[in-house]
């Protein structure tokens, strides 16, 4: 394998590594969102259920309460919040998105490991070409789901901090005009 071919393969590996990290971060974000909203909806539902067991208070004290603390408003408003939270969970399906991004990250990791094998084994030119074509085809066949720019940048920084990849597009020769 020539030096330029090795740089090209390393550039592919860098990009794949960035996407792997980005999808892992995206998966964690969706998983945390699912957990947080689920616990919040559950806690508010419990508050509504147990609000009927609150001790009775005198009518004059009840009349002087801030309107949001009065039982009829509290139950209605909190029920609305619970309905909105559970509706959000139903329609955005954060747990499914977390699994999808986790699996996509795993697929990128597997592809990266195949590239590592290409880089560590000695191949004849025709076999090297065949293996790189297989990598390219597999990469193109992966689901192209989007990650947020924030997590792509975070993944890029993570990979750059490893200092194991050449300069981006370093395999392209400099063209002097």
Image (spheres, rainbow, N blue to C red):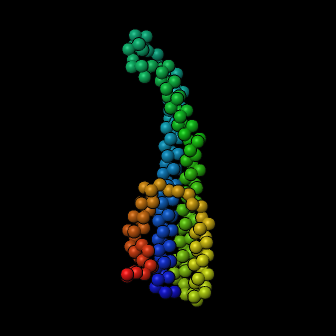
Outermost residue on the bottom side: it is 124
Residue 44 against residue 6 in the figure, above or below: above
Q: Residue furthest top?
A: 60
Q: Tell me how many marks there are.
A: 0
Q: Residue at x 56, y 41 (%)?
A: 89
Relative to 139, say whether 49 is above or below. above
Residue at the image point whose x is 58% and y is 42% from the top: 91
From the viewer's perspective, is 96 left or right of 161? right
Q: Position of residue 27 (x, y in %)?
A: 52, 55
x and y percentages locating residue 66 in the rendered image: 39, 19
In the rendering, at what x and y percent does residue 105 appear? 54, 62
Q: Is residue 164 visible?
A: no
Q: In the image, what residue occupies the spot 52% across and 50% down? A: 31
Compared with residue 82, is residue 21 higher up or lower down, i.e. above or below?
Answer: below
Q: Nearer the viewer, residue 13 or 70?
A: 13
Furthest-front residue in this view: 177
Quarter occupied by the C terminus? bottom left
For residue 60, say whether it is visible: yes
Most foreground residue, 83 or 131: 131
- Residue that appears at 43% across and 55% down: 150
Residue closest to the eye, 27 or 145:
145
Q: Which percent across, then down, holds residue 113?
A: 54, 73
């Amino acid at each position: 394998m020539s030096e330029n071919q090795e740089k090209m393969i390393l550039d592919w590996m860098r990009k794949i590594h960035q996407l792997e990290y980005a999808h892992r971060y995206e998966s964690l974000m969706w998983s945390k969102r699912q957990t947080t909203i689920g616990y919040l909806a559950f806690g508010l539902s419990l508050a509504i259920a147990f609000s009927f067991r609150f001790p009775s208070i005198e009518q004059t004290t009840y009349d002087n309460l801030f309107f949001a603390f009065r039982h009829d408003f509290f139950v209605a408003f909190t029920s609305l919040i619970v309905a909105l939270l559970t509706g959000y969970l139903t329609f955005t399906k954060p747990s499914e998105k977390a699994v999808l991004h986790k699996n996509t990250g795993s697929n990128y990791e597997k592809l990266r490991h195949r590239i590592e094998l290409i880089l560590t084994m000695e191949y004849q030119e025709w076999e090297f070409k065949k293996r790189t074509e297989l990598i390219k085809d597999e990469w193109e066949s992966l689901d192209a789901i989007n990650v947020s720019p924030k997590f792509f940048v975070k993944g890029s920084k993570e990979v750059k901090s490893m200092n194991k990849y050449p300069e981006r597009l370093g395999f392209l020769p400099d063209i002097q005009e």
